[in-house]
């Protein structure tokens, strides 16, 4: 029996667990998400070199489009055909309380289908079935064990894997947990030896890996909580490591102020991938101030060679000020940041001139005209290495009850200093809404974006229209906490 | 910097422990000094048992009966306008037992130890896994997340703060039990389970995501696989790297090759969202091509080799190895 079949059988077994009528029994929700997107790709085209003026390999067509010439032809990029993509996702989540005290099961599965022949365009659509989570849990006051496909949130981020975990609550508010199993690629719910990676990466991992780690969380006082995590991924057969990392995080409360500290360290490259200190405190008259400094260096697993290129990342400072009128009808915020890339030891004396810094500012607010009618807006300016943008959004939202609303949105922004396809302006507008249908909830929206190229005539407009529709149907007993997150 | 981080972190934690807000910081009123005058808690906090919110705290006039400037110094004090921000739908009224049971932990009689109860106090009766299965309505104790989005004065809960959706890593990692008191199991996966609906990003994110990706406003890789998400889409749309040393991309810089090393070290994640590793190995291999070393100063070769020799052999042995083995 293959691994996938085993997982499917285990999943069906979970769902088939007897749900006693007493207590909550089971609950869940089905969510259908469909969208229609309009996309235009880029294609490589060419003209005989004699039709292009100038000399050398780097030239421009008559309309200014950059072209590369090889002695016979000049190649250039132009817009391809306009086409549509209609990805459809179907999620199913089920919680089952077995009737045995402390024993429960949870599963979250997803099906994908793309209407039409454009599966290759929208990422991930070739994966028609996915189990995001499927585990059995036994929880008592002082310990918890899980087995199956599990999500794990730690100071290292968000991982899922197929295996088990055991968590113990010790005296002195100390929680200790150990976990391990078959590692899954982050954001993919697939093992490393996956066709999804090998189809786009010739040097794809050739082995799957085990993931294992230990974590301690400590709350020495109501005002302080901290965690420390060690985790590594090791290949199943050759015993090579894909990663070995350690991370810590802490949150300190001082009255209404919070202090956050995060550190992630890659033991292989001996680099601090993230060191972050953030402080947020309320001030007088409805103001709240937040500040943050952080050092960031990208992390790469050792199945890639990227870490050998000595990435350096940047140091950044961020600040933010929020204000809310005492009545709550008006709120505003402004924030800004400045980042400086560290010395790469690879700067060229001549060449394109790569900038080594970036900054960002934004301001926005929300005004409640009435209890049911509110206006939101934001303007932001983001300039830095690789890509820059400035623009804003404005939306007017009207509620007609708890889940019934209509929202009108307008947007305008300009991208510039972009490495890829140059500058452009986008103007967009549309409508979004929500409607309860019995216990179900329907959300939908339609947006249209008008795109104008500024520098590249051969690139036709990249206009986009977007339609999306979400239908969420809860079932089973409602425990009153449908967790939409915030 | 690296050496300074650990002591700094330890100092912060140690400082926090030593300077942990004492209980009187939470219950700032010096109850122990007034115990001789008020033997019953209800003398000042009658609203706790009666359920009348206005009587939960005494009025200034009550204090002024003694603190009139002659009998005792005048004081400036106002009762809190709203109930303490909390995710718990707690009411004192049905909890009709002695105040000290919850507010004097450990059986202490020292009023200086007066405190708000910790979660364990609640859990000593409301045992998870037992009571939880017998209560059909979570909202009996826990405020619904959608209701708790704003506190009564219109502000976010203090422990969330501004920009929390993008910067909640430390809190989520260190404080998961607290998260679970409001958030359901699937809250994390609603955003982190990539390839789902775009619940985290704004609807126009596809057209505008490049500046956020270059600036790493948030950690893309916490949800997305660089290869199977970013690159797959870029390749499908014709944005993929083709290993050209000069070309229309990269702002049509004719001498891009001279600057690409700095660009790559600054933002290698963006490079890898289009380029395959083999694109770089055409020049940066010790076994073939131009044999340009990609390593920076202080490259920890032995540390990496100790953990994964196969990575090294991708460049340092004839032929190209896969990530795990060749």
Image (cartoon, rainbow, N blue to C red):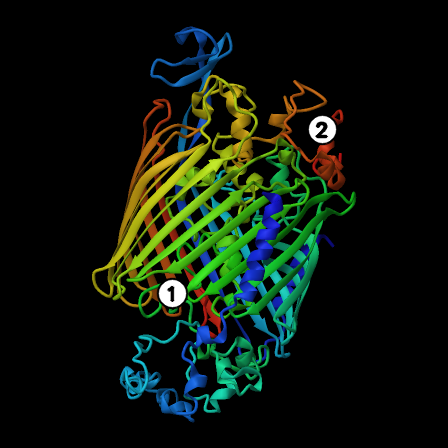
- Which label's residue is closer to the chain start, 2 or 1? 1
Please tell me whether mark 2 sits on a helix, a strand or a loop: loop
In the drawing, what numbered circle is on residue B236? none
Residue B89 rendering spot, x and y as whole percentages: 42, 77
Residue A19 position (above or below residue A370): below
Residue farthest left in this picture: A369
Instruction: State which quarter of the image contains the C terminus of chain A.
Output: bottom left
Residue B205 position (above or below residue B88): above
Residue B121 rendering spot, x and y as whole percentages: 54, 80
- Residue under the image location 34 percent in, 83 percent down: B57
- Residue under the image location 30 percent in, 50 percent down: A364
Task: Tell me the CA gap for discs 2 and 1.
Answer: 53 Å
* Circles 2 and 1: CB atoms closer than 8 Å: no
Q: Is residue A204 left or right of residue B93?
A: right
Q: Is residue A340 left or right of residue B279?
A: left
Instruction: State which quarter of the image contains the N terminus of chain A.
Output: bottom right
- Residue under the image location 72 percent in, 32 percent down: B312
Q: Is residue A216 left or right of residue B22?
A: right
Chain for numbered disc 1: B
Camera sees residue A108? no
* Front-lying residue, A384 or A173: A173
Q: Which residue is identified by label 1?
A: B149
Q: Which residue is identified by label 2?
A: B320
* Front-lying residue, B82 or B104: B104
Residue farthest right in this picture: A238
Please tell me whether mark 1 sits on a helix, a strand or a loop: loop
């Amino acid at each position: 029996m293959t691994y996938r079949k085993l997982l499917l059988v285990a999943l069906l077994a979970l769902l088939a667990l007897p749900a006693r009528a007493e207590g909550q029994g089971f609950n869940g929700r089905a969510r259908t998400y469909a969208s229609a997107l309009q996309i235009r790709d880029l294609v490589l085209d060419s003209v005989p070199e004699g039709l292009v003026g100038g000399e050398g390999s780097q030239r421009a067509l008559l309309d200014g489009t950059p072209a590369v010439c090889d002695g016979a032809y000049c190649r250039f990029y132009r817009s391809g055909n306009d086409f549509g993509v209609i990805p459809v996702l179907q999620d199913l989540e089920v919680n089952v309380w077995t009737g045995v005290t402390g024993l429960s099961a949870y599963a979250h599965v997803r099906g994908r289908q793309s209407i039409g022949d454009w599966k290759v365009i929208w990422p991930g659509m070739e994966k028609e079935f996915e189990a995001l989570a499927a585990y059995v849990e036994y929880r008592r006051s002082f310990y918890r064990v899980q087995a199956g496909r599990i999500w794990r949130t730690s100071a290292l981020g968000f991982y899922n894997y197929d295996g088990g975990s055991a968590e113990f609550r010790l005296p002195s508010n100390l929680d200790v947990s150990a976990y391990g199993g078959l590692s899954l690629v982050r954001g993919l719910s697939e093992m490393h030896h996956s066709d999804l990676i090998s189809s786009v990466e010739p040097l794809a991992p050739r082995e799957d890996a085990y993931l294992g780690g230990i974590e301690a969380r400590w709350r020495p006082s109501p005002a302080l909580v901290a965690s420390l995590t060690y985790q590594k991924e090791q290949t199943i057969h050759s015993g090579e490591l894909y990663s070995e990392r350690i991370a810590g995080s802490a949150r300190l409360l001082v009255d209404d102020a919070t202090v956050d500290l995060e550190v992630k360290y890659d033991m292989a490259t001996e680099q601090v991938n993230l060191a972050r200190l953030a402080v947020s405190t309320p001030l007088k008259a409805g103001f709240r101030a937040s500040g943050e400094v952080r050092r960031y260096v990208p992390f790469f697993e050792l199945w890639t060679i990227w870490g050998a290129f000595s990435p350096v990342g940047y140091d950044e400072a961020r600040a933010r000020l929020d204000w809310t009128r005492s009545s709550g009808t008006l709120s505003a915020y402004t924030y800004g940041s400045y980042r400086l890339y560290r010395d790469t030891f690879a700067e060229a004396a001549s060449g394109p001139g790569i900038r080594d810094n970036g900054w960002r500012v934004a301001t926005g607010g929300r005004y409640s005209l009435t209890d049911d009618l509110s206006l939101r807006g934001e303007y932001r300016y983001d300039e830095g290495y690789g890509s820059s943008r400035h623009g804003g959004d404005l939306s007017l939202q009207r509620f007609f009850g708890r889940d019934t609303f209509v929202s009108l949105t307008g947007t305008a922004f300009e991208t510039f200093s972009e490495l890829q396809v140059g500058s452009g302006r986008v103007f967009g507008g549309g409508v979004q809404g929500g409607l309860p249908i019995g216990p179900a909830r329907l959300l939908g929206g339609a947006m249209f974006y008008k795109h104008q190229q500024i520098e590249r005539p051969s690139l036709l407009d990249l206009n986009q229209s977007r339609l999306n529709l979400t239908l969420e149907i809860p079932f089973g007993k409602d425990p009153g906490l449908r967790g939409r997150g915030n | 910097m690296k050496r300074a981080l650990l002591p700094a972190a330890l100092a912060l934690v140690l400082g926090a422990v030593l300077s942990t807000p004492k209980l009187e910081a939470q219950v700032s009123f010096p109850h122990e000094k007034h115990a001789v005058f008020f033997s019953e808690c209800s003398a000042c906090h009658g609203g706790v048992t009666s359920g009348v919110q206005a009587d939960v705290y005494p009025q200034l006039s009550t204090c002024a009966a003694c603190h009139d400037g002659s009998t005792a110094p005048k004081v400036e004090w106002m009762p809190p306008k709203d109930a303490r921000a909390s995710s718990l739908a707690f009411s004192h009224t049905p909890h009709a037992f002695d105040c000290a049971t919850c507010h004097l932990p450990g059986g202490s009689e020292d009023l200086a130890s007066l405190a708000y109860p910790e979660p364990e106090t609640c859990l000593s009766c409301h045992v998870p896994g037992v009571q939880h299965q017998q209560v059909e309505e979570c909202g009996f104790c826990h405020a619904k997340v959608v209701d708790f989005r704003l506190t009564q004065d219109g502000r976010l809960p203090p422990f969330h703060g501004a920009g929390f959706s993008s910067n909640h890593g430390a809190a989520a990692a260190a404080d998961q039990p607290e998260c679970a008191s409001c958030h359901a199991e699937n809250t994390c996966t609603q955003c982190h389970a990539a390839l789902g609906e775009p619940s985290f990003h704004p609807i126009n994110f596809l057209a505008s995501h490049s500046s956020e990706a270059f600036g790493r406003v948030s950690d893309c890789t916490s949800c997305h696989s660089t290869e199977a998400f970013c690159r797959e889409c870029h390749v499908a749309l014709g944005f993929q790297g083709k290993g050209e040393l000069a070309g229309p991309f990269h702002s049509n810089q004719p001498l891009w090759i001279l600057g690409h090393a700095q660009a790559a070290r600054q933002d290698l994640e963006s490079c890898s969202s289009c380029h395959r590793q083999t694109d770089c190995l055409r020049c940066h291999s010790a076994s073939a091509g131009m044999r340009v070393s990609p390593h920076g100063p202080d490259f920890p070769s032995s540390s990496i080799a100790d953990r994964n020799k196969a990575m090294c052999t991708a460049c340092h042995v004839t032929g190209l190895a896969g990530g795990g083995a060749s």
